[in-house]
Image (tube, rainbow, N blue to C red):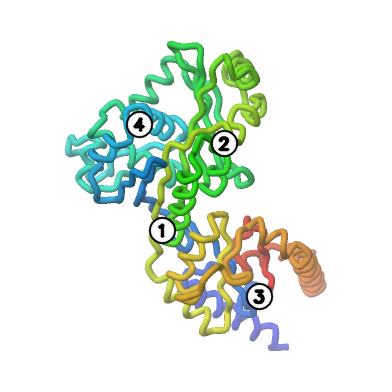
Amino acid sequence: EGLPLAVTISLAYSTQQMLSDNNLVRRLAACETMGNATTVCSDKTGTLTQNLMTVEVAYKPTGVELRRGGSQEAFGRDIGDDAFDYVSWGIALNTTAELSIPAKLAGNGGTLLDSIWSGVQPDVIGNKTEGALLILLSKLQRPNPACDYQQLRVGASSAGTVVARRTFNSKNKFMSVLLKDPTQDIFFVYTKGASEIMLGRCAGLEPSQRQNVAAKISDYANESLRTLVLAHRTITPNDHEAYAAATAAAAQPGCSENEVDWDVLDAAGTLKLDLLVGIEDPLRAGVPAAVLKCQRAGITVRMVTGDNEVTAAAIARQCGILPPNTRGTMEGIVITGRNFREKYASQIATQKKLAEEAARARAAKAGEADGGDGGDDEDEDQGAGGKEDDGTGAIEL
């Protein structure tokens, strides 16, 4: 008769212990589930890393490279006026992120540019990766004041320049914006996205240039940098199919993404590569120690990411998920979310079914004990194997 009470007290004590480790448990029985976990599948950005993005390096296909701490003035001059305009418009308008002066500097009368050039990181409202690009653009503003992203947006808005947007998704891994030139009968498409996808969509590169860009992508990824490519396309009346699609979109102000023929507007092989950037996202303090604790307890830590696998593997080596001298990702230790779902689809389905059956059994048992329906414990097992939105589930691989 005293066993149920003893078990309840033990589980209640366990929840308090887990709470002290910043693990909030809603249902007592979940303590037992968590105690039996043998695998932790973790996301990378914002979980293992701080989600504080900084552009560490930028590279132009002509061979011009800027490292953080280098001369922004020289880099701005070397890009050239035409390319500089494409880069600045592509960064400023192909995003919805904003920068704001940090609260501690807001009352000092300084500008956003002053805070950035004094080394104070501005607050990013929106996507942190896009915020890092806006900070880069602000740094390049000194040699070319015309690239103030806020002024560019105001001018584009007042002239009705922005026609439509293609939002980023995990399938395509790039995003685009369609602009109409208010002074000429032409359109521009600015696109940015994952470098391994975008490089294949860009044309007009000499074989040696393409090879150099590919080598830089690999080098930056091995430095734990997330790599992005910025590209553009100019659409004139001579580009009959694309011009017709752009004109049709411009004739429908406020049209949705699905109403625009993006497969024609930013089609593979029509874009010109403007810039490759490498973005750093530092590890959270304590991550290597936490990974080591898990490994010593016999728990396998895996990284499930939507990022470039080479970049993910480099970060995994930094935090101890992969051994320091390991080459590659090791089977099943560092894997993209898409590959995870494809590779372990049957196991995920089996484990989900077992979890549902176990939850129903517990609910029925609780109902017999108290005369009620016992509630629904189905969600108590979620998260033991990683982030639910990665589709991982609580499974042992």
Q: Amino acid at mark 1?
A: Gln
Please tell me how crowded label 3 is: few (under 14), some (14-19), or many (20+) other residues with Cα within 10 Å.
some
Q: Quadrant of residue 264?
A: top right
| Point 75% across, 65% down: residue | 352
Neighbours of disc 1 within 10 Å: few (<14), some (14-19), many (20+)? some
Q: Which callout, 1 or 3, points at the residue further toward the start of the chain?
A: 3
Tag in front: 4 or 3: 4
Mark linked to residue 167: 2
Cα separation, mark 2 vs mark 1, equals 24 Å
Residue 84 is tagged as 4
Examine the rendered structure and indicate whether residue 354 appears above or below residue 297.
above
Mark 3 is on which residue type? Thr
Task: Kindly check if marks 3 and 2 are in contact, taking CB atoms under 8 A apart as contact.
Answer: no
Q: Position of residue 279 (x, y in %)?
A: 40, 51
Determine whether the residue tagged by mark 1 lies in a helix, strand or loop.
loop
Residue at the image point whose x is 49% and y is 31% from the top = 232
Residue assigned mark 3: 33
Q: CA distance from mark 2 to mark 4?
A: 24 Å
* Residue ID at (38%, 40%): 62
Q: Are marks 2 and 1 in contact (CB under 8 Å)?
A: no
**Cα gap from disc 4 to disc 3, whole angstroms:** 55 Å
> Residues at badges 2 and 4 in contact (C-beta under 8 Å)?
no
Name the residue carrying label 1: 50
Q: Give the foreground label among 2 and 4.
A: 4
Q: Secondary structure at mark 3?
A: helix
Does residue 337 appear to the left or right of 216 in the view shown?
Answer: right
**Secondary element at image label 4:** helix
Upstream in sequence: badge 2 or badge 4: 4
